[in-house]
Amino acid sequence: MGETTFNPNVAIHPGKTLQETLEAVGMSQAELAERTGLTPKTINEIVQGKSSVTPETAIKLSAVFGMSVAFWNNLQRNYQETLARLEVEKKLSHELVNLRKFFCYVELAKWGYVKKTNVDQEKIMNLLNFFGVSSLNLVPKIQAAAFRKSNQKNLSHESLAAWLRCGELEAQKIQTREFDKNKLIDSLAELRGLTRQNPAVFEHKMVELCASFGVAVVFVPYFKNTFVNGATRWVNDKAIVQLSLRGNYSDIFWFTFFHELAHVFKHGKTDQFVEFEDGKHLDSIEKEKEADEFATNTLIPRNEYANFRQKNDFSYGSVTNFANAINISQGIVAGRLSHDYSDWKQWARIRNRLKFVEKEQK
């Protein structure tokens, strides 16, 4: 037969057993005090549940009543453990209202960040461990960027907070060198070249190259109702560029990456940036414009693009030739044209989507 665990809903103090034992043998508290050398006050406080049965007291009670020392010690230990468990259960019951907001638990479990369970108390404990907090009420404080006021309709701040936390945990696995702004700038051309590769090729190289100049690039599966493309922040002196794996068009993905990279070396370590799919931001407009301009001109240099547009030939062949000439993905050129001319149909067949292989963690 399998073992079962009995979890009483009331903590019984050893004093209760002591009182019952005294009554069973017909002994008064005063007489027990004389036999044990303890003061009557001490005996009474144990019976009243005001004092604990210490290991020394357990030895004396064992000598008087013939029960083992372990018996009395176990009564005290079980009482304290039950008290602690009941306190935890009481606390967790107050967290239930917060748990309902974290419907992303299923996604967190799917990707291996928390254990799968249908028990609410276990979910709460797992979320507390995941976020590293003593209460889910503290999540908005430690993930403040996720809870800023936003115009995003149906945005789940809790899911966004969870997504950002996943990025922090993934970044811990990446060994980065000390941040080197000059090396970052020197690596831009090589990073641009990766836009012509598929994710299976560029993911590892991208992470490795960025780590060499002190930036941890992490890819985290998209969570429902986060509408997020990317985020940037510094955690424990490590710069993190977090990108969403949601099958974005290549031009959006790479624009987001270089946009986030701009935040790393152009803005302060105390800043946190979150970029949404529709281009809306929760951060400084000026800093966002600066990052946008950097990403735009890094991907397609201003002068080259101006010369290309002057030719007024935006056919498939012309776009492809221009992309090859500046060593960039043709999808990025198509995306730029679509944006500038507000025409998302003409170059749709050239705007390729990136397909990431998302694997569940074990």
Image: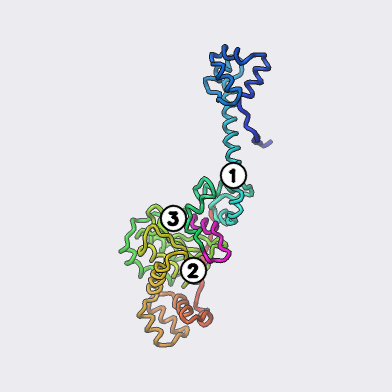
Identified at 59% across, 26% down, the residue is 49
Q: Nearer the viewer, residue 183 or 54?
A: 54
For mark 1, does the 10 Å Cα neighbourhood hold few (<14), some (14 to 19), or many (20 or more) residues?
A: many
Q: Nearer the viewer, residue 357 or 120?
A: 120
Disc on the earlier residue, 1 or 3: 1
Task: State the image coordinates of residue 257 (x, y, percent, origin top left).
Answer: 43, 66
Label 3 vs label 2: CA separation? 25 Å
Residue at the disc numbered 3: 171
Task: State the image coordinates of residue 46 (x, y, percent, origin top left).
Answer: 58, 23
Query: Considering the numbered disc 2 on the image, is that residue within a helix, a strand or a loop?
Result: loop
Q: Nearer the viewer, residue 102 or 360?
A: 102
Looking at the rendered structure, the kind of residue marked 2 is Lys
Disc on the earlier residue, 3 or 2: 3
Looking at the rendered structure, the kind of residue marked 1 is Leu
For mark 3, does the 10 Å Cα neighbourhood hold few (<14), some (14 to 19), or many (20 or more) residues?
A: many
Q: Which mark is residue 92?
A: 1
Label 1 vs label 2: CA separation? 36 Å
Q: Is residue 231 above or below residue 5?
A: below
Task: State the image coordinates of residue 311 (x, y, percent, origin top left).
Answer: 40, 87
Query: Considering the numbered disc 3 on the image, is that residue within a helix, a strand or a loop?
Result: helix
